[in-house]
Image (spheres, rainbow, N blue to C red):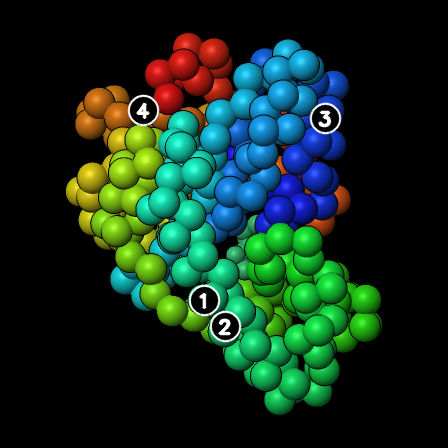
Amino acid sequence: MHTHTTCSDGTMTPFELINEAKKIGLQGLSITDHDGVSAYTDELFDYARANGIQLMTGVEFSCRFEEMSIHILGYHFDHLNEAIQDLCKRHVIRRQERNLLILERLRGRGIRIEPEELKQKAAGVIGRPHIAKIMVEKGAVGSIQEAFEEYIGDNKPCYVPGASFFIPETIDMIHQAGGKALIAHPHLIRNKSVVKKLIQLPFDGIEAYYARFPLDQEREWLEIAEKKGWLISGGSDFHGTIKPHNPLGSSWIGLEEFKKL
Ligand code: AMP
Ligand code: ZN
Ligand code: FE
Ligand code: FE
């Protein structure tokens, strides 16, 4: 229910991801690329069907909230809907602008990456992992992790968030397209007062199971969902070889929850 492909910062194509899902025995799948829905083509739906995988539309939208980067998962919406398509287009512009600013800051620290190089690295939505990969290839850092920790991770010296997109508007767009909006990986939000405010917003659900977090850290989110009558989801945040520690299927939901979504 939470996966990335070459349409954003994952390393498998959507078709390869369907193969992988089948291989590990999943019955359903949602591709939730960052700020884009270009994975969803008629050919992909046909391919999923032919391989016995129920494919649910999904997306992971980036938002700003209280000076923090918060991700919102959208599910089971019409990916051709104008509101969604328009929001994705606006994110492409945000990323173009902010990626240039990130490259500028890196240049200030002696790491030269040309915008053209970055463009060639990505097939779809361009994000920080693409920048990190080039930094590793150039020998500027020893690993992708180091690129984030020293330079481009949230609030690190070369980080630039870019234009702000706000949560209520994003939820509204997902709703306009007939979908459900869920808080992504609350596990990663350390500030509990932010969580308290977030759950007052008109979400439909929360990603209770995430990557390889243990059950005791998931109970909190299951309780919130129960209290609010929210939907729950869960997924691995699979990115392929760029994040090898998160294999597909490291978190999941059952068919019953899938159908509710
Ligand atoms: P962006 O969408 O361009 O802001 O990049 C966000 C993506 O970068 C996340 O979804 C992760 O895939 C990756 N990312 C963020 N922080 C880290 C980190 N500390 N280490 C490795 N990857 C990260
Ligand atoms: Zn990502
Ligand atoms: Fe995320
Ligand atoms: Fe993700």
Q: Earlier in the sequence, mark 3 or mark 1?
A: 3
What label does residue 231 carry, if any? Answer: 4
- Residue indicated by mark 2: 98
Q: Is residue 156 left or right of residue 221?
A: right
| Residue 96 in the image: above or below residue 194 | below
**Residue depicted at 81% across the width and 66% down the height:** 137
Q: What is the secondary structure assignment of the residue under circle 2?
A: helix
Q: Which image quarter: residue 81?
A: top left
Residue highlighted by disc 1? 94
The CA distance from mark 4 to mark 2 is: 33 Å
Label 4: element kind:
strand
Residue 196 can be seen in this image: no
Q: Position of residue 96 (x, y in %)?
A: 53, 69
Q: Are marks 4 and 3 in contact (CB under 8 Å)?
A: no
Residue at which label 3 appears: 20
Please name whichever residue, 79 or 253, is drawn nearer the observer in this view of the structure. Answer: 79
Q: Position of residue 189 (x, y in %)?
A: 38, 50
Q: For the residues labelled 2 and 3, say whether their Cβ atoms are less than 8 Å apart.
A: no
**CB under 8 Å between discs 2 and 1:** yes
Residue depicted at x 54% and y 23%: 55
Mark 4 vs mark 2, foreground winner is 2
- Amino acid type at mark 4: Leu
- For label 3, the crowd category at 10 Å Cα-Cα, with few meaning under 14, some 14 to 19 and many 20 or more, is some
**Which amino acid does the dot numbered 2 rest on?**
Arg
Give neighbour class at mark 1: few <14, some 14-19, many 20+ (Cα, 10 Å). Answer: some
User: What separation in Å lies between label 3 and label 1 (alpha carbons)?
Assistant: 32 Å
